[in-house]
Image (cartoon, helix red, strand yellow):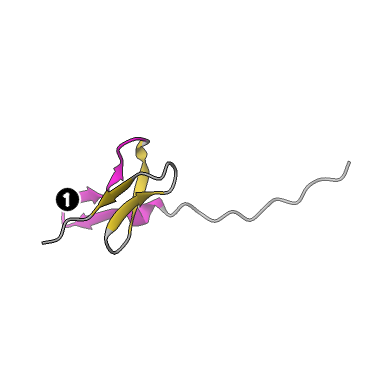
Amino acid sequence: MAKKKPKNKKQSEVWKKYKVDGEKLTKSKYCQKCGPGYFLASHSNRYVCGHCGYVEMKRKE
């Protein structure tokens, strides 16, 4: 049987979910159902989990 070619996978880019402010490290919101390994995507009016579909609405201020 012939060998399969390796697929080119996109990197997870987890480093974009963290922000450094001086000495302080802050993390983006994570899903309440899935746990801290799954980050919420930030849209204009809501946060959404791509894994389970959990939605959290942003507050108007």
**Of residues 41 and 19, which is closer to you in this image?**
41
Count the labels in the image.
Answer: 1
**Per the image, is 18 magenta?**
yes
Q: Secondary structure at mark 1?
A: strand
The magenta-colored residue range is: 14-33
**In this rendering, is residue 46 above or below 30?**
below
Disc 1 residue type (three-letter): Lys
**Of residues 60 and 10, which is closer to you in this image?**
60
Q: Quadrant of residue 1?
A: top right
* Residue placed under numbered mark 1 in the picture: 24
With 37 as the anchor, is 59 left or right in this view? left
Q: Quadrant of residue 60?
A: bottom left
- Residue at figure coordinates x 21%, y 49% from the top left: 25
With 3 as the anchor, is 60 left or right in this view? left
Q: Indicate the quadrant containing the C terminus: top left, top right, bottom left or bottom right.
A: bottom left
Place of residue 42 in the rendered image (x, y in percent of width and height, measured from the top left): 31, 57
- Residue at figure coordinates x 25%, y 52% from the top left: 57
Place of residue 53 in the rendered image (x, y in percent of width and height, measured from the top left): 40, 45
**Of residues 50 and 1, which is closer to you in this image?**
50
